Image: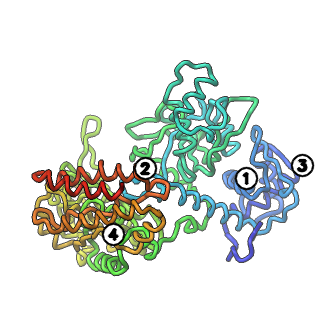
């Protein structure tokens, strides 16, 4: 039901306008019809009397998903038959109600994505899910593709094992496969694929339906969590709803060096070349679930930053001011003070929203080069080709969107050969040189860094292998040293939620240890232990076993490195930590 006060305006998307025609078409068909029948009836009705929207099969399929969500079409379909519910037979589908259904659906999946916990990735962005990409084979010879397309689903076999949501781990799935199919030793790859389908795949992930090693049948976006649907006709009972774009008639083949795997389901997120081609195809199709796409980008404020990152408001304001003044900053501090965790959230807080498309991250290392960063010649076949690097491409993207800020994050910035990596960019990154053009050495073109690009670097002050930072880098960046956040309001609030005296004692012991480290002339405050070691716990997991693991396997090895020439000191300080959690 639409809630009063929730809808401020009527969406103007064609998909909203298609809601009523789809319902009316099904009513004319007697309450149910196969997908092609519904398409034909909608097209016929629109051609006769409705000029408010134009006919598009993809919009009709999308509307079916929205009407299932709203409770107006049955969710269980048989061979592509769409059936109205009792509500669907009588509802007056107004423009306001249709808009409300789409908005509620968007909010539902946005909330699901926000609640779903994922492991910390390279951006240190645990808790904020990233879109993942998967290749999918709809049957060994793509025989399930038309059924997937007609019903807006993806299907996986081995249905006799039953509802996989009831399995507690991959071993349970493995055992169920062996029992159900009479196998003495079922392939572990199958249990892994089924586990990924149920638990690792998320709403919003991109699916590439493949036929053979290179042909693309379709591209879709996951619209639902895992479902188990029993069937008497086949074994493909494991289901997720997917909004597909049919590419089977376009003869599209993937052009990357790698090809699609033989497995039914395979994550391809790490194949950047393949993912870029998929994104290009998606851009061509403009596969947005709503014309008002900004509704899908979650807002993010200064206050949310302070709740999550454990710095005080004054520190945040100083960092914000330095970044806006210099365009380039370096966050420095000991391991565990939250540099990587902070960087992307800092970008989000300044943007005012969690728009990951405007944030890019790389990690420097000794072999990282100008060719990786900007452009250079790469081997290809029997010769070489000019390829543009990640920073060049990022700047070009920002250049086309000059009214919004873009953030380029560099982890371990001190570990690369900075003169070799930056080259002529040392001058161009300066605030007053933004927009100034220089000719690139490998290409006959001029290049400049847009004023809306901000650079956030990170480095560890406790890294004994550090060389002196190049003066040219120091002059162009503001260096900001981060403190352990144990006394921050956000961390203290987090401590209170754990209700653990043992945890409180351990934090007090670590704060005392940090004072010892600061007083040591061979170490200093840059070697203090940060708060990140202790984040992510719950009242259930903040127990003696977990805290012992943190002390014995994370903190004590650090102390052994700090005081490698004084084992008595290590034992003394380690003993205080152990005593705190007993």
Read off the residue under disc 1: 64
Specify how the rendered protein is coloured: rainbow
Q: Are marks 2 and 1 in contact (CB under 8 Å)?
A: no
Does residue 407 show up? yes
Does residue 393 show up? no
Read off the residue under disc 2: 276
Q: Position of residue 545 (x, y in %)?
A: 40, 49
Q: Position of residue 231 (x, y in %)?
A: 74, 33
**Residue 487 placement, left or right of 152:** left
| Residue at (37% x, 53% y) in the render | 547
SS type, badge 2:
helix
Badge 4 or badge 3: first in the primary sequence: 3
Front in this rendered view, residue 213 or 417: 417
SS type, badge 1:
helix
Q: Are marks 4 and 2 in contact (CB under 8 Å)?
A: no
Q: CA distance from mark 4 to mark 3?
A: 65 Å
Read off the residue under disc 4: 485
**Residue 468 placement, left or right of 18:** left
| Residue at (28% x, 60% y) in the render | 410
Front in this rendered view, residue 70 or 558: 558
Badge 4 or badge 1: first in the primary sequence: 1
Front position among marks 4 and 3: 4
Q: Are marks 2 and 3 in contact (CB under 8 Å)?
A: no
Badge 4 or badge 2: first in the primary sequence: 2
Q: How many marks?
A: 4
SS type, badge 4:
loop
Read off the residue under disc 3: 30
**Residue 532 placement, left or right of 238:** left
Front position among marks 2 and 1: 1
Q: CA distance from mark 2 to mark 3?
A: 45 Å
Q: CA distance from mark 4 to mark 1?
A: 49 Å
């Amino acid at each position: 039901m639409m809630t009063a006060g929730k809808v401020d305006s009527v969406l103007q998307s064609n998909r909203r306008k298609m809601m009523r025609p789809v319902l009316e078409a099904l009513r004319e068909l007697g309450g149910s019809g196969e997908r092609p029948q519904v398409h034909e009836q909608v097209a016929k009705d629109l051609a006769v009397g409705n000029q408010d929207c134009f006919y598009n099969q993809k919009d009709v399929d999308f509307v079916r998903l929205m009407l299932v969500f709203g409770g107006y079409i049955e969710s269980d379909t048989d061979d592509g038959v769409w059936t109205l519910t009792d509500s669907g037979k009588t509802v007056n589908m107004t423009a306001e109600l249709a808009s409300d259904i789409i908005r509620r659906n968007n909010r539902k999946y946005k909330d699901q994505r926000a609640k779903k916990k994922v492991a910390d990735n390279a951006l240190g962005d645990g808790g904020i899910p990233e879109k993942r990409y998967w290749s999918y084979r709809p049957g060994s010879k793509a025989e399930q593709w038309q059924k997937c397309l007609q019903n807006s689903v993806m299907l996986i076999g081995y249905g006799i094992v039953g509802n996989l949501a009831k399995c507690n781990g991959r071993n349970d799935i493995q055992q169920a496969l062996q029992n159900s199919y009479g196998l003495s030793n079922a392939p572990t790859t199958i249990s892994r694929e089924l586990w990924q389908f149920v638990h690792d795949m998320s709403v919003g992930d991109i699916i590439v339906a493949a036929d053979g090693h290179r042909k693309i049948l379709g591209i879709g976006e996951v619209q639902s969590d895992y479902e188990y649907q029993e069937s008497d006709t086949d074994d493909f009972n494991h289901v997720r709803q997917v909004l597909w774009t049919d590419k089977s008639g376009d003869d599209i083949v993937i052009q990357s060096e790698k090809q699609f795997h033989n497995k039914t389901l395979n994550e391809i997120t790490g194949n950047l070349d393949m993912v870029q081609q998929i994104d290009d195809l998606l851009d061509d199709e403009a596969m947005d679930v709503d014309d008002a796409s900004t509704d899908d980008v979650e807002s993010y404020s200064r206050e949310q930053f302070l709740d999550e990152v454990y710095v005080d408001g004054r520190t945040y304001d100083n960092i914000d001011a330095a970044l806006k003044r210099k365009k380039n900053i370096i966050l420095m501090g000991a391991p565990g003070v939250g540099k990587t965790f902070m960087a992307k959230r800092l970008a989000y807080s300044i943007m005012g929203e969690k728009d990951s498309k405007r944030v890019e991250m790389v990690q420097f290392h000794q072999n990282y080069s100008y060719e990786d960063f900007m452009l250079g010649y790469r081997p290809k076949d029997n010769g070489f080709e000019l390829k543009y690097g990640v920073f060049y491409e990022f700047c070009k993207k920002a250049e086309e969107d000059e009214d919004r800020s873009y953030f380029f994050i560099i982890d371990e910035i001190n570990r690369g050969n900075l003169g070799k990596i930056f080259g002529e960019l040392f001058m161009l990154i300066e605030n007053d040189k933004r927009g100034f053009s220089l000719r690139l050495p490998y290409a006959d073109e001029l290049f400049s860094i847009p004023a809306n690009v901000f650079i956030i670097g990170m480095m560890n002050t406790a890294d004994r292998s550090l060389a002196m930072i190049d003066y040219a880098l120091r002059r162009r960046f503001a260096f900001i040293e981060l403190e352990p956040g144990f006394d921050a309001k956000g961390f203290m609030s987090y401590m209170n939620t754990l209700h653990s005296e043992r945890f409180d004692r351990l934090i007090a012991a670590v704060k005392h240890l940090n004072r010892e480290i600061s007083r040591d002339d061979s170490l200093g405050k840059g070697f203090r232990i940060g708060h990140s070691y202790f984040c992510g716990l719950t009242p259930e997991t903040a127990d003696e076993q977990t805290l012992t693991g943190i002390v014995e396997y994370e903190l004590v090895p650090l102390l052994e490195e700090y005081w490698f020439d004084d084992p008595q000191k290590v034992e003394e300080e380690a003993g205080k930590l152990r005593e705190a959690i007993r």
